[in-house]
Amino acid sequence: IPAPMTRESGTFNVNGRTMRAEYEARTTLWEVIAVKLGLPGTNRSCNRASCGACSVLIDGVPFYSCHTLATEAVGKRIFTVEGLGDEKNLHPLQQVGYRYMAADCGYCTAGWEVVAKALLDKNPNPTVDQVKAELAGHICRCAAYPSIVRTVIDTAKVLRGEAEIV
């Protein structure tokens, strides 16, 4: 009996950088991002594609990285929270969210931030209901939902130039 193909190698475009990794054929995108490529910002929580903490964007579309095979993302544009901003240059979502305490414990933050970014990229003036619908797949253990929604709405105002971050 021939041995099954268990090793793969792929090139990933993560946050605009080309990165290469070797992995088993059954490896999730989360494992490649966090373990193989050393980008730990994306959290794995439930490992069942139900909490949203591991969300990343693939070609601008939100995906649960804990249930997406790495091989499905090879050659595609992947966006993680590390691409959003860093401690020296926070994205407005991060700045506003900090002020509103939208990241009480912070475990779900990486997931909802990248999904909110995708929403704001395609809809610069979302309604509260649109934000809630887009973030419906995210569970916040701290129940900071009102602060999260307010963060997205007010970040949209900042990005449109209608408000400033104070």
Image (cartoon, rainbow, N blue to C red):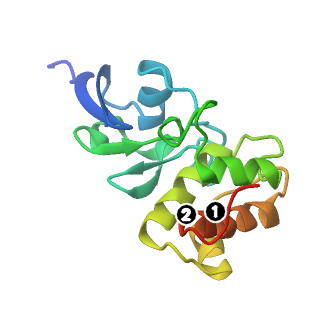
Residue at disc 2, secondary structure: helix
Instruction: State the image coordinates of residue 86 (x, y, percent, origin top left).
Output: 58, 33
Q: Quadrant of the C terminus?
A: bottom right
Picture coordinates of residue 96, whole percent (x, y): 71, 54
Visible residue check, residue 135: no
Q: Is residue 106 visible?
A: yes
- Badge 1 marks a residue whose secondary structure is helix
Query: Viewed as shown, does residue 94 lie left or right of 140?
Result: left
Circle 2: residue type: Leu
The kind of residue on which mark 1 rests is: Thr
Q: Residue at 32% of width from left, 37% of height from top?
A: 16
Residue count near mark 2 (Cα–Cα under 10 Å), binned few <14, some 14–19, many ≥20: some
In this view of the protein, which residue sits in the foreground, 106 or 157? 157
> Which mark is drawn over residue 155?
1
- State the residue position of label 2: 159
State which quarter of the image contains the N terminus.
Answer: top left
* Whole-number angstrom distance, CA of label 2 to CA of label 1: 6 Å
